[in-house]
Amino acid sequence: MLTVCSDTHSNEGHALEGRTLDAVREADAVIHAGDFTSTSALEDFYDVADTLYPVHGNADSAAVRDRLPTARTVEYEGVRIAVTHRRDGGPTALSLFGRQKGADLVISGHSHDPGVVETDAVTLLNPGSHAQPRGNRPGHAELVATDGGLDGTLVQPDGTVFEEFSIRP
């Protein structure tokens, strides 16, 4: 399983709880789309995740930004994934970013609003924020390999699944 988180915004650790914590611990790999805020949160993610692919966000401290890239590309079960915190220009800019990276899926954060958008070129995924939803539903994403790609769910920390989607390269 691939678990996707973003926008932790914590000064005191990973702020993971419930199903989100379990999903990070159980995952083969974890992608974090930025805004850990502190090195404490980043280090705690490294402690609980077997493999972590993080990027930094706009609210990350200088110490976090110095350690993490602004964007990265990850291959998981035959799916190419481009990761960034945000792109000015919204879905259009994220779609262009994905096309530039040859991605099937673009993961971003920043808005704290979980959701999936299908474009002609790529699928856009924002897992939301598990810890600081800011008026939105708290969430993270879980993706599992299938014969044709990845099947995903958006999940609240209490375990409630609120959206299902598929990625087919």
Image: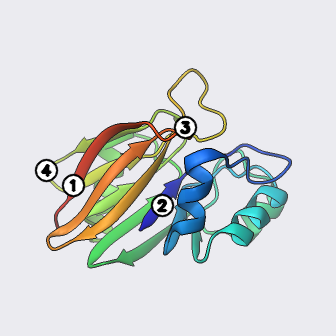
Q: Residue 29 location, x and y as percent? A: 50, 72
Query: In the shown orientation, is residue 153 left or right of residue 113?
Result: left
Q: Residue at x 41, y 56 (%)?
A: 142
Q: Residue at x 66, y 39 (%)?
A: 131
Circle 1 SS class: strand
Q: Residues within 10 Å of mark 1 (few under 14, many from 20)?
A: some
Q: Residue 103 location, x and y as percent? A: 29, 67
Q: Which residue is mark 2?
A: 3
Q: CA distance from mark 3 to mark 1?
A: 22 Å
Give, as a three-letter code, the residue at label 1: Ser
Q: Residue at x 46, y 42 (%)?
A: 88
Q: CA distance from mark 1 to mark 2?
A: 14 Å
Q: Which residue is mark 4?
A: 120
Q: Nearer the viewer, mark 3 or mark 2?
A: 3
Give, as a three-letter code, the residue at label 3: Asp
Among the 4 quarters of the image, the one containing residue 132? top right
Give, as a three-letter code, the residue at label 2: Thr
Residue 166: mark in rendering: 1
Q: Residues within 10 Å of mark 2 (few under 14, many from 20)?
A: many
| Quarter of the image that includes the N terminus | bottom left
Answer above or below: position of 53 versus 121: below
The front one of 25 and 64 is: 25
Callouts 2 and 4 close, C-beta under 8 Å? no
- Mark 2 / mark 4, whichever is N-terminal: 2
Q: CA distance from mark 3 to mark 2?
A: 15 Å
Q: Residue at x 50, y 38 (%)?
A: 156
Answer above or below: position of 22 versus 50: above
Circle 4 SS class: loop
Give, as a three-letter code, the residue at label 4: Asp
Callouts 1 and 2 close, C-beta under 8 Å? no
Q: Nearer the viewer, mark 1 or mark 4?
A: 1
